[in-house]
């Protein structure tokens, strides 16, 4: 009983951290900020079109019944309840790897170039630089992880779970297979550790980023402004130079589209610069595009435990075996595009 009580207490504390820790990527305050932006956008759009502002109409625009009642939304709730605890354990493991890799990079640089001289920069300047460096590293790691999962067959089979969402809600961000989350966390740890090690060597000592509850303050700002809206039906599109620097909600909705034109596009998180640099950027149109979400052909068990937690292991193993030279091969799609066109 004591063990059970301790486990329940630990999980409850973790759930509180998810909702109430300022730096959490799903905090109540960030969700309220996203809702405020969504309300302002809907009000502005209705006023521009000369439509009256009615509370019921506003509610329908923000929370359409087709989304609230969708089996995909119900499944997202289940993913949230499962992954919010599983991913917590993964983060704990990755944190150890991150520190180990950071020390390895720093020691390697010292062995190659000698011990660095302490920086003469003021603390605020060095902390600001490392904050920007680590944010850009997060964005690059996110892009690398996402690119590999759309191009490497066995990684796509587990990442495809996220793309089976047929409607988008902020909870869709938790629609991740545990193996997908594990790979994501370790790729981020590697890229961030390299960056942190280089930063520590450059400044001659460990330099800490500006953070809120342990999260990069720039990333926290993006989460509060619009990142939650990327997994919604709100068509807020950044165009021109803005659309080549920042990934708007419409950018990410395009990423989930079943239209072949949109396959393997907009792979970043907050910034579009890596997509722009590596040729995977698709700037959305100003007017809302008619998009459908999901994976084609649709999977009958797309929103079940078997279909989204167990079956992907088998598909991933089959795809991995097909990549080994000399072994009998089955027909395995190589990319998301080939999967959705099959």
Image: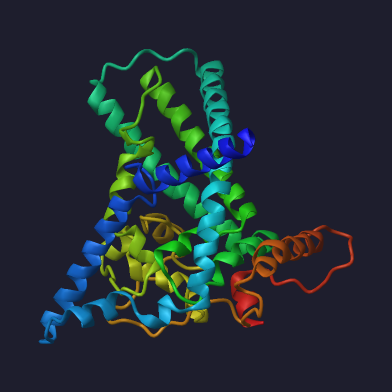
Which quarter of the figure has residue 328? Answer: bottom right
Query: Of 299 and 295, which appears nearest the observer?
Result: 299
In this picture, is 52 found above or below 63?
below
Find residue 146 and report its horizontal and vertical position in percent: 53, 57
Q: Please tell me which residue is depicted at 37% across the width and 65% down the height of the picture.
A: 230
Q: Locate the N terminus by quadrant.
A: top right
Which quarter of the figure has residue 58? Answer: bottom left
Q: Locate the C terminus by quadrant.
A: bottom right
Find residue 109 and report its horizontal and vertical position in percent: 52, 22
In this picture, is 11 found above or below 274?
above
Residue 286 seen in the figure: no
Query: Of 59 and 340, which appears nearest the observer?
Result: 59
In this picture, is 320 found above or below 168?
above
Q: Give the residue furthest to the front.
A: 1
Q: Please tell me which residue is depicted at 42% across the width and 15% down the height of the picture.
A: 116
Find residue 70 and report its horizontal and vertical position in percent: 48, 78
């Amino acid at each position: 009983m004591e063990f059970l009580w301790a486990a329940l207490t630990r999980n409850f504390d973790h759930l509180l951290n998810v909702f109430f820790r300022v730096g959490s990527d799903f905090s109540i305050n960030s969700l309220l900020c996203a809702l405020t932006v969504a309300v302002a956008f809907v009000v502005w759009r209705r006023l521009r079109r000369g439509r009256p502002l009615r509370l019921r109409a506003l509610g329908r625009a923000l929370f359409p019944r087709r989304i609230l009642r969708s089996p995909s939304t119900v499944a997202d709730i289940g993913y949230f309840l499962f992954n919010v605890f599983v991913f917590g354990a993964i983060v704990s493991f990755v944190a150890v790897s991150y520190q180990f890799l950071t020390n390895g990079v720093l020691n390697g640089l010292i062995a190659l170039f000698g011990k660095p001289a302490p920086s003469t920069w003021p603390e605020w300047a060095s902390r600001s630089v490392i904050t920007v460096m680590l944010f850009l590293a997060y964005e690059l790691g996110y892009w690398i992880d996402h690119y590999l999962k759309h191009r490497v067959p066995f990684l796509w089979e587990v990442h495809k779970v996220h793309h089976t969402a047929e409607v988008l809600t902020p909870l869709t961000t938790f629609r991740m297979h545990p193996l997908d989350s594990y790979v994501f966390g370790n790729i981020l740890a590697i890229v961030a550790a390299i960056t942190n090690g280089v930063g520590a060597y450059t400044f001659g000592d460990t330099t800490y980023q500006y953070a809120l509850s342990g999260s990069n303050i720039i990333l926290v700002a993006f989460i509060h402004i619009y990142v939650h809206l990327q997994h919604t039906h709100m068509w807020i599109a950044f165009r021109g130079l803005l659309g080549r620097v920042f990934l708007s909600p419409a950018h990410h909705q395009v990423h989930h589209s079943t239209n072949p034109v949109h396959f393997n596009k907009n792979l970043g998180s907050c910034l579009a610069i890596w997509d722009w640099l590596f040729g995977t950027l698709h700037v959305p149109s100003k007017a809302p595009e008619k998009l459908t979400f999901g994976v084609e052909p649709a999977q009958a068990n797309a929103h079940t435990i078997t279909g989204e937690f167990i079956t992907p292991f088998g598909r991933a193993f089959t795809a991995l075996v097909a990549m080994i030279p000399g072994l009998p091969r089955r027909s395995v799609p190589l990319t998301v595009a080939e999967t959705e066109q099959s």
